Amino acid sequence: MSFLKKIIQPFITKIPYKTIAYYSYHFRRTRYYYQHNRADFANIESYCMFLGYPRSSHTLIGAMLDAHPNMVVAHELNVLDMVKKKNSRDWIIASILAQSDWFVNKINAQWTGYSYLIPNQWQGKYKQLKVVGDKKGGVSSRLLTQNPQLIEQLQSVLQMNIKIIHVVRNPFDIITTMASWKGEKRIENITTEMLKEQTEQFFMRVEAVQQAKNNPKYPVFDLYNEQLTAQPAQTLSQLCAFLGVDAPEDYLKDCASIVFAKSKQSRQTAPWNEQLKQLVLNKTQQYDFLKHYTFD
């Protein structure tokens, strides 16, 4: 990106987290948390990292975790990029708190036309801080594809346990939805060629996930979207156990109240031909977490 474009972009973008107002608020709040909340940072036990694919319910799951009294999970912060830019541990944690604060208090937990506001719980704040994280799954997978050592750098900077959340849904739905969006802009008429291009992008991310799963140093929780929609409280309770926090009944009930009863089957609206379907099916057989999926 050119220097001039970097200067003028905040004035022309419609993306809420890339405006002058956002950067100003986020910096001020990060500085506040850095100055006033650092004593709490010593008690943090784990960092939860999302890996996976764009448009895969990461925002929903991140919002539910952020609603827990002992967790703060940022929305779209991109902590791996902060690690690449040599930010310190405490500044990264303060930025996570500021991003959670911004998502709830400045845009009311609204994103891509949906509300992720959970009643009665702890979004944008915390009671006792045990887990922090960042909801940036698709980008994190891409960055790890480019540089697999980033996760080691992340652990070195944060000096805490790294736990990975891998959100999975039907690959045909993921690829269709990836083809249906360009940045924050919805594309109405997708083509088979667009699906083919996104199939390649999807499996690049799948391979990054598999490489992470091959490393026993960093435990991975496979969260299947269909299980979340069918049994939201039970699935969230299992995720909380993985992250090392309890799951109060009122918390599970309030979080479950915003989960859709059924996942969208985006694949049914896209121009999938038989050759491309078979290509995807053949590739999914190489991965245990995908091989049970079909198009129908």
Image (tube, grey):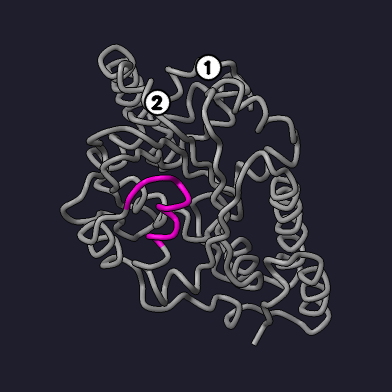
Q: Quadrant of residue 239?
A: bottom left
Residue named by callout 2: 95
Check contact, mark 2 vs mark 1: CB within 8 A: yes
Of residues 126 and 12, the one nearer the viewer is: 126
Residue drawn at point x = 58 percent, y = 63 percent: 168
Q: Main secondary structure of the magenta part?
A: helix
Element type at marker 1?
A: loop
Drawn side of residue 35 relative to residue 131, left or right: left
Q: Magenta segment: does it hold 173?
A: no
Outermost residue toward the bottom in this view: 296
Q: Magenta segment: does it hold 245?
A: yes
Q: Quadrant of residue 228?
A: bottom left
Q: Which amino acid does the dot numbered 2 rest on?
A: Ser
Residue named by callout 1: 87
Q: Which amino acid does the dot numbered 1 rest on?
A: Asn
Q: Position of residue 78 (x, y in %)?
A: 52, 35
